[in-house]
Image: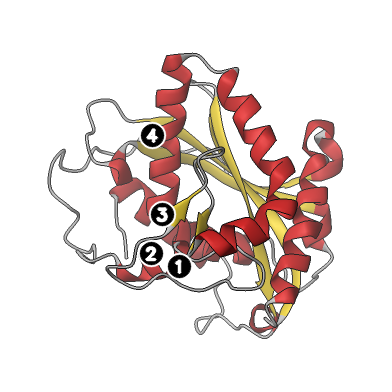
Amino acid sequence: MQATPPPESPALVHRHPATDRKEQFRKDFASHCQNSKCWRVRKEGEIYFRCKGCDDSLYCSKDCQKAAWPTHRDECKTAQEARAAMSPTERTNREKLLAYTEKHSPIICAAALRGLELDRDLSRSQQYYFEIETEVREGQTRPETAFYVTRASPQLLMCHPNRRDIWKTLKEQVEVKKDTQMATVGAFCVEVVCRSLNVQTRFPVVVDEEVLTFQEPSGDRSLWHQALFRNMNEGIVY
């Protein structure tokens, strides 16, 4: 998809009227124990433990965190090294992009699944990653409107040699999900980038069996693009 002009800035302070104030879907979607033998969704009011090394992975208990360490060790080390190499400004900018991405994670994953057309060819999950290009929106104080999307499209892994490490991570994530008895058939990677700030965030998405049989009611296969741009550019969160 081609880049679009910057959208008009939404209100600086107030939530979008279409936003769910509790953001329950996003919270249920994003918050789960990352021990492969558990994968328990965090309920409202529960306290989960965050890895102090990468400051990202969540666990429902210290026991789960300990059990997950053998598979998390390398990822944690990489995250720590990347953070150490950043300047204070880069760390701040990346935290803002992470917060923006987390707010919009459900629509990002749904749109990427459709955009990659995995229902037509599942092998595309091994050949492509999904890239979302953003630009910073100056003057915004709410995380869901701190950036806006300018482009979203599948990218061939073979055309980006520095992304080949993605597939190793994805295969590990597939095995993690299979351990939890989920109907997992594959995985792919999403990358959200803001080139003007030189920051990015990357995360794997698993593909469940239901995606292979999904049919858009209207038959319009471009609806993912409209939904992604509307939600991420207007600050709509569910």
* 76 left or right of 142 in image: right
Q: Report the residue at 28% width, 25% height from top.
A: 138
Tell me the SS state at disc 4.
helix
Q: Amino acid at mark 1?
A: Phe
Task: State the separation of the CA atoms marked 4 and 2.
Answer: 17 Å
Give the mark, 4 or 1, whose residue is nearer the N terminus. 1
Between circles 3 and 2, the one closer to the viewer is 2
Q: Report the residue at 45% width, 47% height from top.
A: 101
Q: Nearer the viewer, residue 73 or 18?
A: 73
Residue 75 visible to an observer of this rendering: yes
Residue 26 numbered tag? 2
Q: Nearer the viewer, residue 59 or 87?
A: 59
Task: State the separation of the CA atoms marked 4 and 3.
Answer: 13 Å
Give the mark, 1 or 3, whose residue is nearer the N terminus. 1
Q: Which residue is mark 3?
A: 104
Task: State the separation of the CA atoms marked 1 and 3.
Answer: 10 Å
Tell me the SS state at disc 3.
loop
| Marks 3,2: beta carbons within 8 A | no
Give the mark, 4 or 2, whose residue is nearer the N terminus. 2
Give the mark, 4 or 3, whose residue is nearer the N terminus. 4
Q: Amino acid at mark 2?
A: Arg
Question: Considering the image in quadrants, where does the C terminus appear?
Answer: bottom left
209 shown above or below 161: below
Q: Residues within 10 Å of mark 3 (few under 14, many from 20)?
A: many
Task: State the separation of the CA atoms marked 1 and 2.
Answer: 5 Å
Q: Residues within 10 Å of mark 4 (few under 14, many from 20)?
A: some
147 shown above or below 156: above
| Marks 1,2: beta carbons within 8 A | yes
Q: Nearer the viewer, residue 159 or 161?
A: 161
Q: Amino acid at mark 3?
A: His
Q: Which residue is mark 1?
A: 29
